[in-house]
Structures are given as C-alpha cells and as structure tokens.
Amino acid sequence: MAEITKGPLKDATGHLGGATIYQRGKKTFIRETHIVQPHRLSRTQLVLRERIAHNNILWRRLKATRHTHFEGGVDAYRRFMSVNRLSPTVYLTKGQVSNNTSLLLPNMAVSNGPLTPISYQFGEVDGQPALLTDLTPKDIRKGEYLLYVVQQEVIHWQGGEDLPQVHISVETVTPEQFTLVPSTLQSPYISKDGTLALVDDRFGDSMQGFALVRIQNNHVSSQHVITRCNYYERYTTEEALQAAAKSYKGLTGEKSYSTTTSV
C-alpha cells in the first residue's frame, strides 16, 4: 500500500490494471488488487446475477415514473429488489443487459405497503375488456387509486436479434372511471354484487400488464402486475441460460452447450 500525494491520481478511485485506488479519510492510497472476480460463473451464481441485473433494469423503468411506493426496509430500491426476488428469472447476455433489455413479467411488484390489497382479474363488461376488481363504491371514496400500465415493446433489428423494452406509466384513476358491475354478470371473478371495474380496450391487449394501487394517508397496498403477455418465456429456457453463460465465458463445472436456437 502506498499513499498518492500528487499527480492526476490524487483524487481518483477505482481499479487501474492490477491495482486498486481508494480514499481513506482525506488521503488517497493505491494497493495491489488481491481479489479478482472470475469471468466464469457457476449455474447458481449466473441465475442470481441474471435476476439482479434484470430487476435493476425494471427498477430504473419504475423509478422514471416517480411512483416508487415501497414501504419498509432501508429504502424503496432495496424493498423493490426484495419483494421481486421470486419473480421469473430471465436470462440475458452481457450485451443485452448493456442495452437495457427488459421484459414484462407476471406478478412483478409495483408497490408494497400495509393497506388491504386490491383483488383484480381480467374479464368483460357488456362485451368490452375490463379489469374486474373487488372494490365497492364506498371504497373509492377513500384515498387515491393509481393504475400502473406496463407495455412490452419489441424492436426488431435487421440483423435478426430482437431488443425487448418495457415501458411503465402511471395514471391517476378517478371515481368516475369505475363502472358498477351489474349483478347479472356471469363471471368467475366476481364474488359479490356491487363491485367495480375499469373498462378499456387496453385490458384486452396481450402485450400489456396492469396493477391497481390504493393510496391512503401516505400508505399503499401491495400490488402485482397481471398480464396475458408470455413473451418473456423465450428468455427462461435452457438455451437462453446457455447463451447468457457464454457471454460471461461459460459456466464452471459444465461442458459447453451448443444449440441452433437463438434468443
């Protein structure tokens, strides 16, 4: 270890060749790097890296809406990462992660809090696509409701590789936008009369997902995305895992896997 007292590296931090430059107090030091992260990973390490990398991308998409309602824990980011740790794992190559490839996942958490969760399912009202809820007219007079809309876009490049991107928007829902579900409606989703639904053609779109969040007295309900979109499934296969592993120099303890199937 040596102290740097002058020159262009005096205020620097990071890695330079086989050395690490760091700050301690108001002084700058340089030392040999003893720990080198391996390029190759075990299968377990790869799965963990892939889950964290993709959830980080989704977090940035959600953060851009300025509606990151996650209570408890150290901060909203860490709470988001914690409650989304059980979402489906998608396998992306190093290049796809660098290009912020993102996928619409079922059950993605968009909020986390102590209020009673809203139950909702896709259905129809008078032949129109709808989001059927368990809310009553009395419910919507309390607090505020936000609709999270998650759109899966797929950009097709001339080279043949797709670049999926997720876009998230948040809308305030007013009481006037809810429709009272008629008591004669035959639906497996409605357990009682007098419930409310949001009616919109968007709820029939197989490339969109939705979540409805209750906000009251600075608290929120814990809500997850529901969607008909299954585009993400092609990134959960063994072929996708092996393609991701190859971009990180392969898996430790396993032979290389060859396939003609591309992601």
Image (tube, rainbow, N blue to C red):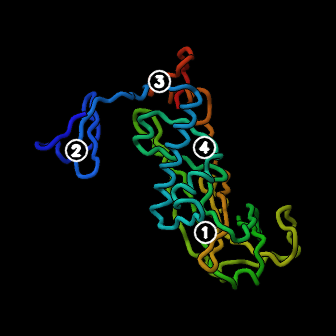
Q: Quadrant of residue 100?
A: top left
**Location of residue 83 in the rendering, given as x and y in whole percent from the top left corner:** 63, 53
Residue 139 locus on image (x, y percent): 74, 80
Residue occupying the point 55% across, 25% down: 42
SS assignment at label 3: loop
Identify the amino acid type marked 3.
Arg
Q: Which SS class for mark 2?
A: strand
Tell me where residue 98 sits by quadrant: top left
Q: Amino acid at mark 4?
A: Tyr
Please give the label number shown on residue 28: 2
The three-letter amino acid code for the residue at tag 1 is: Leu
> Which residue has dot 3 on it?
40
Q: Which is nearer the N-term, disc 2 or disc 4?
A: 2
Structural distance between the alpha carbons of marks 1 and 4 = 22 Å
Q: Determine the CA span between mark 3 and mark 1.
A: 42 Å
In the rendered structure, find residue 231 and report the number of the disc placed on it.
4
